[in-house]
Image: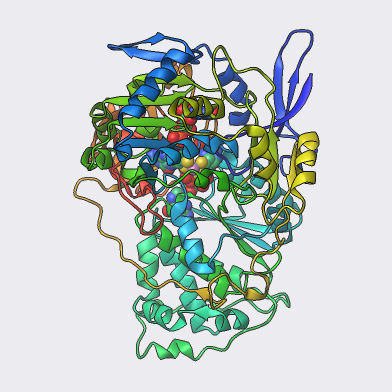
Amino acid sequence: MEKISACTLDCQDSCSTVVKVDPENGRVRITGNPDHPFTRGFICKKGKNTYQRNTSEQRITTPLIRKGDNFLPTDWDTALDLVAEKLKALSKEPASILHVRHYGYRGFFADASKYLFNALGASSTRGALCDDAGCAAYMADFGGLEINDPQDLLNADHIINWGKDFSRSSIHLAQIINQAKKRGCHITTISPGADGNHALSDKVIRIRPGRDRFLAAGVIKEILKRGLAHGPALSQANGMGPLMEILARHSQEELLAACDCSREDLIHLLQVFTKDKANAPPIGEDICMAPDTGQTSRMSGMEANNTQRQPVALIMGWGIQRYHFGGETVRYLNALSFLSGHVGRSGGGTYYNISSGRNLNSDWVERAGQPARTLLLPRIGQEILTAQPPIKFLLADGSNFINQAPDSHTTLTAMEQIPFKVVIDAFLTDTAAQADVILPCALDHEREEIVGSCLHNFVNRSTPVFPPAGEALNDFEIMSRLALRMGISFPDKASLLKEALDTPHIKDPVTALEEIKTKGFIKASHPKIAWQGLCFAHADGKYRLPTSLSPESLPPQGFPMHLLSLVNGDYIHSQIPESDQTSPENDLLCVWINESSFHLNGIDLTKQVFLATALGRMPVRVKKTSHLHPGTLIIRRGGWLKYSRCVNALIEPAITDMGETAAYYSQYARLEN
Ligand SMILES: Nc1nc2c(c(=O)[nH]1)N[C@H]1C(S)=C(S)[C@@H](COP(=O)(O)OP(=O)(O)OC[C@H]3O[C@@H](n4cnc5c(=O)[nH]c(N)nc54)[C@H](O)[C@@H]3O)O[C@H]1N2
Ligand SMILES: Nc1nc2c(c(=O)[nH]1)N[C@H]1C(S)=C(S)[C@@H](COP(=O)(O)OP(=O)(O)OC[C@H]3O[C@@H](n4cnc5c(=O)[nH]c(N)nc54)[C@H](O)[C@@H]3O)O[C@H]1N2
Ligand SMILES: [Mo]
């Protein structure tokens, strides 16, 4: 048997899959759909691993009800009657019901729980664990979320990879970059190092974490000073005067010191962003490092340069915005690309996350009502503890927030204070372990979904290839059964599906629905080049430049190291088999450090080492590497609290400057014996 389906994991590549079942031995193979222009016949390790999760012995396959410290299996009616009874008891105080939903899986039907809890008038969450700081920055700059088609990267002369780990988080983007490289495109990677980008890059700039805005500001300053800004961009820019004043306050020496970058790094970027097609002689290397003397207006005498430049595409990872000033950072990177004339053209532009729901019509979710109030997800523990009226009921679906939101121990304490908790999941995660009722969900390739991508313009259909394991049900079905008990009318799937593709970017939703059913995917039509003609989505059509360049504070006493908790190449977030966290070779969480880091002095590596922050410490295994920024520690996130592998137990709940996102990477730490 062979069926076309799709991966619904929370990942930009959003793959169309082919599921093959060998008729002889029943063996299952999941591969990428060769006909899908973005998936192109291959998928990543975490996508391949989904079937192992479906058939895992650890999978929860019946509803469970807590009895003391244990869970006892029960039937759906008993479990759902109990949940409905608890909800009904709170019908006069719906704000004391908290719904937490995250993106353990994505899709059109995945929002069913939002519909029901909106209809109940419950509390919900706001803010983000992922990418909203960057999205808010894009909205501030362009007024909308648009990027060039990823295939257009093939037209770039130079690609700047600003903090994306292609090898781990987006192997299809990596393939396009390799293809571009074969056509002669050059790649510069800017990152703290020790990622999987070396082989792909012609030049690597090693930067201090969270300081990219200073490097971008330095390049912009130089571009403006030399009259190399792009004329049409200048006439569409709003905020030029204030930006020049900001830049005039900082010398190049100061900006480069703030990000631990060199003059050569600055010159390299200056040359890349201003290289012209006529192969004009490269820019001289006479960068003035000293503070500006005289008036700011010295920079305003610039000559707008309109020569056609070699196109430069700038790809931003999500990592760069997981900082206190993550929004500001993204704004400087956009400004650099814009002012040097690379926005609105083929082979150029900046790439980030555009909403994966933009090609789906999810209006139905809002029809039911609005949340009573919202609690900040990146600080969820503290928020629950101080909520007035207090939270008396919680339902979480598609979310392992105890594990994935910062400050896990506070979240645990908060959970203990909630009288009744329901978790819909397929595994006994750190969050599910706190529940009073666990409802077992269907997983990938067991349920119907329509999924978009935040990177490409294809919309895929995920078809159920296997029945859900045991008694498991898909979330939509669970919500409709619960709605029935609550006396709330719930839409049926077939009629909803008719409106799923009714969006401005899909020409004929009826034909599109037929096509997606037969082919497994369709393409939404977005302009191949974003912001062509430099007309932006703000009311005045102009681009907005950054309005501040915030200084960094010093590391807290005793914690000199940046702690980066990065993606794990083999798994998505905490969806890691327990056996992989308990094997002898994996007994401890690994921390990577530069072999010549100052921080290794005084640490005895023959004894047990701990990773410590102001919140506590955790035993770790230290691994040395050569390319990492010396003031930086890297760990791979997702390990479970119950195995002492959850880094969020050590991460303070800091919030970004824009978009209310968790500023995970602003965490300082140390190693100790
Ligand atoms: N320290 C640190 N932590 C981080 C980050 C970081 O940079 N540093 N970044 C984070 C990022 S980028 C993100 S997006 C978030 C991720 O945060 P979460 O989305 O909470 O991450 P997961 O660990 O994938 O948990 C999702 C859960 O959904 C379950 N699930 C899968 N399929 C289904 C389904 O069909 N129905 C239901 N009901 N459940 C299902 C899975 O089993 C899993 O337990 O957290 C992040 N946490
Ligand atoms: N295998 C796998 N793939 C995934 C996921 C997963 O869990 N596993 N999660 C998915 C999700 S939800 C997300 S959001 C994405 C995340 O995908 P990425 O954006 O790739 O994720 P991160 O690991 O947060 O950060 C990527 C890189 O940012 C760099 N970086 C960190 N801080 C800085 C900085 O200050 N400056 C610069 N220049 N670089 C910096 C680091 O070198 C790191 O390698 O991946 C998706 N894909
Ligand atoms: Mo994410």
For this rendering, which residue is in front, 257 or 635?
635
Give the residue drawn at x 65%, y 45%.
Answer: 174
Q: Position of residue 181 (x, y in %)?
A: 71, 53
Name, please, the residue furthest toward the left: 557
What is the count of numbered marks?
A: 0
Give the residue drawn at x 38%, y 28%.
Answer: 589
Q: Is residue 489 above or below residue 68?
A: below
Give the residue drawn at x 76%, y 39%.
Answer: 516
Quarter assignment of residue 650: top left
For this rendering, which residue is in front, 222 or 321?
321
Is residue 217 visible from the viewing direction of this image? yes
Q: Position of residue 64 (x, y in %)?
A: 41, 14
Q: Position of residue 570 (x, y in %)?
A: 55, 30
Quarter of the rendering occupied by the C terminus: top left
Is residue 193 visible from the viewing direction of this image? no
Task: Name the side, left or right, on which 5 lies relative to 633.
Answer: right
Quarter assignment of residue 490: top right
Quarter assignment of residue 107: top right
Task: Name the side, left or right, on which 296 lies relative to 114.
Answer: left
Give the residue drawn at x 55%, y 21%.
Answer: 473
For this rendering, which residue is in front, 282 or 663?
663
For this rendering, which residue is in front, 577 or 469?
469
Quarter of the rendering occupied by the N terminus: top right
Q: Position of residue 220 (x, y in %)?
A: 49, 74
